[in-house]
Amino acid sequence: MPNATVSFQGKMVFEGISGSGHHVLMDSSPESGGANQGIRPMETVLVGLGGCTGMDVVSILEKMRVATKSFDMEILGKRAEQHPKVYERITIRYRFSGDLSDSDKIIRAVTLSQEKYCSVSAMLAKSADITAEVYINDTLVTTLGEVHDSG
């Protein structure tokens, strides 16, 4: 079972240690009593989503024998105005570059990640509408709107 420990470090700083032994420092803004010494907890959710879907996409593209020059994602989250201020809408902008004439395979890899493999995306879809935008060489080639039913 995955696990983590989180330890109070003072003010609003917490150190998280994953079950695999990796560390992350979290803090809040000075306006919220923090010292801006680490990532915000809700930001870690977006980073985790990017890591999860990104690993899926890379793995799928390797199996499809599709090489990219570069691949990155921009993840934009819109939170509810009232507490607990969960994410209501998330947009993932997948950006690929290189000699990528077979855009159908890239779109398929993103679709598979979002609809079948990415557990972080599936979990977040319980509260948020998730949209995936696929860009190849700075051109938007498709938008997969609300890829999960947030029922």
Image (cartoon, grey):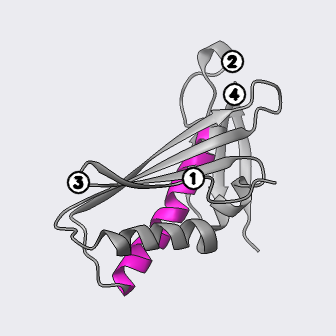
Left-right relation of 34 to 112: right
Residue 114 place in picture, x, y as percent: 57, 65
Q: CA distance from mark 4 to mark 2?
A: 8 Å
Q: Secondary structure at mark 1?
A: loop
Q: Secondary structure at mark 4?
A: loop
Residue 9 place in picture, x, y as percent: 68, 35
**Residue depicted at 82% across the width and 33% down the height:** 84
Q: CA distance from mark 1 to mark 4?
A: 37 Å
**Residue depicted at 77% across the width and 74% down the height:** 1
Q: Which residue is mark 3?
A: 137
Residue 12: image tag: 4
Q: Is residue 106 above or below residue 35?
A: below
Left-right relation of 115 to 8: left
Which of discs 1 and 4 lies nearer the camera? The answer is 1
Q: Confirm whether the magenta stretch covers residue 119.
A: no
- State yes or no: discs 4 and 2 in contact (Cβ < 8 Å): yes
For residue 102, what is the image quadrant? bottom left
**Residue depicted at 57% across the width and 47% down the height:** 46
Label 2 CA crowd tier, 10 Å (few <14, some 14–19, many 20+)? few
Left-right relation of 150 to 39: right
Q: Can residue 23 be seen at all in this image of the molecule?
A: no
Q: Which residue is mark 2?
A: 32
- Which amino acid type is marked by label 2? Ser
> Mark 4 vs mark 3: which is more N-terminal?
4
Q: Which residue is mark 1?
A: 145
Please provide the residue range marked out in magenta.
43-63
Residue 104 place in picture, x, y as percent: 36, 72
Q: CA distance from mark 3 to mark 1?
A: 21 Å
- Which amino acid type is marked by label 4? Met
- Which amino acid type is marked by label 1? Gly
Q: CA distance from mark 2 to mark 1?
A: 34 Å
- State yes or no: discs 2 and 1 in contact (Cβ < 8 Å): no
